[in-house]
Image (spheres, rainbow, N blue to C red):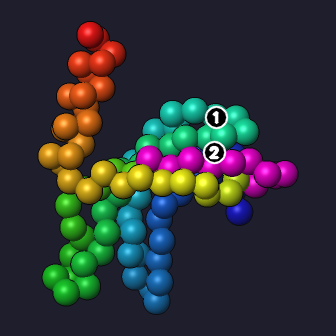
Amino acid sequence: MASKPEELSVSYSEGGVELIKELDKVILSKGAWTTILFRLQEWDPRKREYGADKYSIRRYQKRGDSYLPKSKFTISSREQARAIIDALSAWVEG
């Protein structure tokens, strides 16, 4: 179990296959509640290759010496990511 936000990861392997490959992460906030934005790819067993990039925002709560996952939202496409960026940019710059 991770004891620091930098140790948290979405990478996941099963049967010797990395089913979720973490490509990058940005820690958005630290503390009792930590928020991290991950860039990832999921393994497609039918195609035997990784799919397109996805992005996941995950919240963790620190309990004792470890972080427990509490919520997550996955941005499933580049188009959805662009729409979120555009909306946030308009709100922040507006």
Q: Is residue 58 above or below residue 15?
A: above
Q: Quadrant of the C terminus?
A: top left
Q: Amino acid at mark 2?
A: Pro
Q: Are marks 2 and 1 in contact (CB under 8 Å)?
A: yes
Q: Magenta region's main secondary structure?
A: strand
Q: Which residue is painted at 63% across and 45% down in the image?
A: 5
Q: Which residue is painted at 74% across and 47% down in the image?
A: 62
Task: Name the image quarter holding residue 51.
Answer: bottom left
Q: Quadrant of the N terminus?
A: bottom right
The magenta region covers: 57-66
Between tags 2 and 1, which lies in front? 1
Question: How far apart are the two marked residues, 2 and 1, measured between alpha carbons?
Answer: 7 Å
Count the marks: how many? 2
Q: Which residue is painted at 40% across and 82% down in the image?
A: 17
Task: Report x, y in % for residue 15.
Answer: 46, 89
Q: Is residue 70 magenta?
A: no
Task: Report x, y in % for residue 27.
Answer: 52, 37
Kind of element beneath mark 1: loop
As rendered, which of 91 and 69 lies closer to the eye?
91
User: Does residue 3 appear in the picture of this structure?
Assistant: no
User: Does residue 43 appear in the picture of this structure?
Assistant: yes
Task: Report x, y in % for residue 37.
Answer: 44, 43
Q: Earlier in the sequence, mark 2 or mark 1?
A: 2
Disc 1 residue crowd, few under 14, some 14–19, many 20+, Cα 10 Å = some
The residue where tag 1 is placed is 30
As rendered, which of 33 and 18 lies closer to the eye?
33
Q: Which residue is painted at 19% across and 87% down in the image?
A: 46
Q: Amino acid at mark 1?
A: Lys
Task: Report x, y in % for residue 11.
Answer: 47, 65
The residue where tag 2 is placed is 5
